[in-house]
Image (tube, coloured by chain):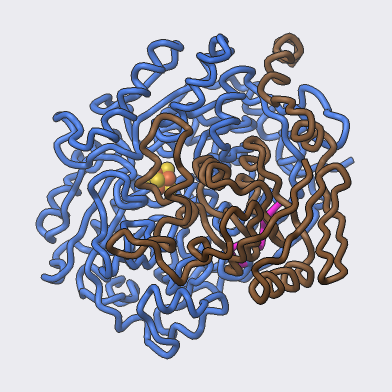
Chain colours: A brown, B blue
């Protein structure tokens, strides 16, 4: 998974799952089509038209696959609909200083790469992208590296080897656990 | 080596270490509700696998259910469809369901403990972040996403990274009018909305030891609001009395439970000590649960208030919080929808009437809480005060049913989240204890409950 893309800056701390996808959109029984309601309340005006001041509606951010958020992105509810909305919109990487635990797990399970960098780097990248929307950011999962050439910035990020393997080789964690049913049964008998 | 309660329970549930510090953790109990489960059941059907341990799953309908006329079909077709999917899925996969109208129906985190399903030493999950509530019993309980719901259904286990541990100790004498809700709002305001991210918290100290199980649940419930994976409290006689009054437990099991408690010299990754005397009744003034301030404070007293939040809440920095006029009061949710909460409210409002311009909804957390309240004639007190006593469900906590707070209206709410739009688009939420909510309903302004306590 190597991404080279423009980015959407959203420098707001504690963006919660109710902002990512409001509760009224949780009534579906499938995983499809949540992207159009991503950040619904910020993205659309009362009359349903796009809010021109919101970065997702900025034509310069079109087709961006990277989102740069403030600290503690995805806090709040466990709703995986938040990750489905982010993925369905076309975001493949989210950069932040820190993610809420449940969101982070949900992101991995939906092929989204959550990348945590230090405060300074996030601030610098955000500023650059605000000033120069055309800037492209490179993210390599293989090398666990974020690269922004304009800033001369190269930063490694952490990911557990298991999650990396899952993302890189499309290993499905659920299949992995189903294959472990024998061991689980043994565990139950021995406890 | 001395160990914490958390570490003991975790270690007893490791099926297998995955190479890099990740563990496969066995899950004892799985709770399900209608919102986060349909896609998981679909996943099972696609894979052609059955539920691995259906007897360790219990489901209920709570998020979408109306709180009026529950005997009639749900009007909103999408909500109806979700609730019906749950019925169908539980039938197909052999899972016990406490649906609408069932005497055990209620908010998932209220019924588990009340039915004696939640027991010390367990690992408990649910596709819901407030699963941390069950930590009050000395369990490892935490919320999971829908993919993980599918995994637990499929294999009764999860691949998890081991969180760090944090001890939060509160000792001393609580001030008048300070409830469990104020204690947890205070802790969250101290640590911040992300202050415990990556940690599992153990609450200790005489304040929690003196709390009832219901008060402990209120505290553990909101652990997630400071980012914690979960929160738990040591197992003692209070825990055991609560559980054994609901289900029969053999003596040996009780000894095993008590042996799980944190050893004296156990070391936490982080330790925080707070003084009970510093805690006062609190209300939030922003759009994150860490914006709690005292009722005598101005909005600027919150160190976590942001400009964006001020704009949304229509507050100014130097506004006095207790001057704010209230439009709605919501008493309920998995944080404060239990019988002791309703008793506290009834006690305070007895002989008083709500302010004319305020709408007050009292929504019990479960059918059992509702019938208990009726048995104690609390419903009559509510009625005499002009409070609407509803049928059980999540209700205005997240406004997925028709219980929505209109845009611009201010709601004093005993729930757990004041995020933008949480209680309805444009709704302004002020989190508070049941006492503060009740006092505010009477005066029509955000009000310190201590003036009613004598
Ligand atoms: S009452 Fe609120 S927080 Fe609790 S489970 Fe229901 S929606 Fe979630």
The picture places residue B228, in percent across and down from the top left corner, at 63, 52
The picture places residue B150, in percent across and down from the top left corner, at 56, 24
Name the foreground residue: B25 vs B117: B25
On the rendered image, what quadrant is the N terminus of chain B found in?
Answer: top right
| Count of numbered labels shown in the rendering | 0
Task: Locate residue B321 relative to residue B263 in the image: left or right.
Answer: left
A157 drawn magenta: no
Can you say whether A180 is above or below B81 in the image? above
Name the foreground residue: A13 vs A131: A131
The picture places residue B347, in percent across and down from the top left corner, at 25, 59
The picture places residue A19, in percent across and down from the top left corner, at 47, 57
- Residue segment shown in magenta: B192-198
Q: Could you tell me which residue is drawn at 38 percent across and 44 percent down?
A: A25
Q: Could you tell me which residue is drawn at 44 percent across and 67 percent down?
A: B178
Displayed-image quarter of ligand 1 = top left
Task: Locate residue B181 relative to residue B412 in the image: left or right.
Answer: right
Which secondary structure dominates the residues rendered in magenta? loop
Whether residue B136 can be seen here: no
On the rendered image, what quadrant is the C terminus of chain B found in?
Answer: bottom left
Q: Could you tell me which residue is drawn at 53 percent across and 67 percent down?
A: B290
């Amino acid at each position: 998974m190597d991404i080279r893309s423009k980015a959407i800056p959203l420098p707001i701390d504690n963006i919660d799952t109710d902002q990512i996808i409001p509760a009224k959109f949780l009534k579906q029984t499938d995983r499809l089509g949540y992207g159009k309601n991503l950040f619904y309340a910020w993205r659309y005006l009362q009359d349903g038209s796009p809010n021109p001041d919101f970065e997702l509606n900025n034509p310069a951010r079109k087709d961006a696959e990277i989102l740069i958020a403030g600290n503690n992105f995805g806090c709040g509810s466990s709703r995986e609909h938040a990750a489905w909305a982010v993925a369905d919109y076309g975001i493949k990487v989210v950069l932040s200083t820190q993610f809420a635990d449940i969101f982070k797990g949900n992101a991995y399970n939906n092929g989204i790469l959550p990348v945590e960098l230090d405060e300074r780097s996030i601030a610098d990248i955000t500023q650059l992208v605000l000033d120069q929307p055309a800037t492209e950011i490179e993210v390599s999962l293989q090398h666990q590296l974020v690269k922004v050439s304009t800033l001369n910035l190269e930063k490694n990020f952490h990911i557990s080897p298991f999650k990396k393997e899952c993302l890189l080789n499309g290993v499905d964690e659920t299949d992995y656990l189903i294959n472990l049913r024998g061991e689980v049964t043994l565990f139950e008998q021995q406890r | 080596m001395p160990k914490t309660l958390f570490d003991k329970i975790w270690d007893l549930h490791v099926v297998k270490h995955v190479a890099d510090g990740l563990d496969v953790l066995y899950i004892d109990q799985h709770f399900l509700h209608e919102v986060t489960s349909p896609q998981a059941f679909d996943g099972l059907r696609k894979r052609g696998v059955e539920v691995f341990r259906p007897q360790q799953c219990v489901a209920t309908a709570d998020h979408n259910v109306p709180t009026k006329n529950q005997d009639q079909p749900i009007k909103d077709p999408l909500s109806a469809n979700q609730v019906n999917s749950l019925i169908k899925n539980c039938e197909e996969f052999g899972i016990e369901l406490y649906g609408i109208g069932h005497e055990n129906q209620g908010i998932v985190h209220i019924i588990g403990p009340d039915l004696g399903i939640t027991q010390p030493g367990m690992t408990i999950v649910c596709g819901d972040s407030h699963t941390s509530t069950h930590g009050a019993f000395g369990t490892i309980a935490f919320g999971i996403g829908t993919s993980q719901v599918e995994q637990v259904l499929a294999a009764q286990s999860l691949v998890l990274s081991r969180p760090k541990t944090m001890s939060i100790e509160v000792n001393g004498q609580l001030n008048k009018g300070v409830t469990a809700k104020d204690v947890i709002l205070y802790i969250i305001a101290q640590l911040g909305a992300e202050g415990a991210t990556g940690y599992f918290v153990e609450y200790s100290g005489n304040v929690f030891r003196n709390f009832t199980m219901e008060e402990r649940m209120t505290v553990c419930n909101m652990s997630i609001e400071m980012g914690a994976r979960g929160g738990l409290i040591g197992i003692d006689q209070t825990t055991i009395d609560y559980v054994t009054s609901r289900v029969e437990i053999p003596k040996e099991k009780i000894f095993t439970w008590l042996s799980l408690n944190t050893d004296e010299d156990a070391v936490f990754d982080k330790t925080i000590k707070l003084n009970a005397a510093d805690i006062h009744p609190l209300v939030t003034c922003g759009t994150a649960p860490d914006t709690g301030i005292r009722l005598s404070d101005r909005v600027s007293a919150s160190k976590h208030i942001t400009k964006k939040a001020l704009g949304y809440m229509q507050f100014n920095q130097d506004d006095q919080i207790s001057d704010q006029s209230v439009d709605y009061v919501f008493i309920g949710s998995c944080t404060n929808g239990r019988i002791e909460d309703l008793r506290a409210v009834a006690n305070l409002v007895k002989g008083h009437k709500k302010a004319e311009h305020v709408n007050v909804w009292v929504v019990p957390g479960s059918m059992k809480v509702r019938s208990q309240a009726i048995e104690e004639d609390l419903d009559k007190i509510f009625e005499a005060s002009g409070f609407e006593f509803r049928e059980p469900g999540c209700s205005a906590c997240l406004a997925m049913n028709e219980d929505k707070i209109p845009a611009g209206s201010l709601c004093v709410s005993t729930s757990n989240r004041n995020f933008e739009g949480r209680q309805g688009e444009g709704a302004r939420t002020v989190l508070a204890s049941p006492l503060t909510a009740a006092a505010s309903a009477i005066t029509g302004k955000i009000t310190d409950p201590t003036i009613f306590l004598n």
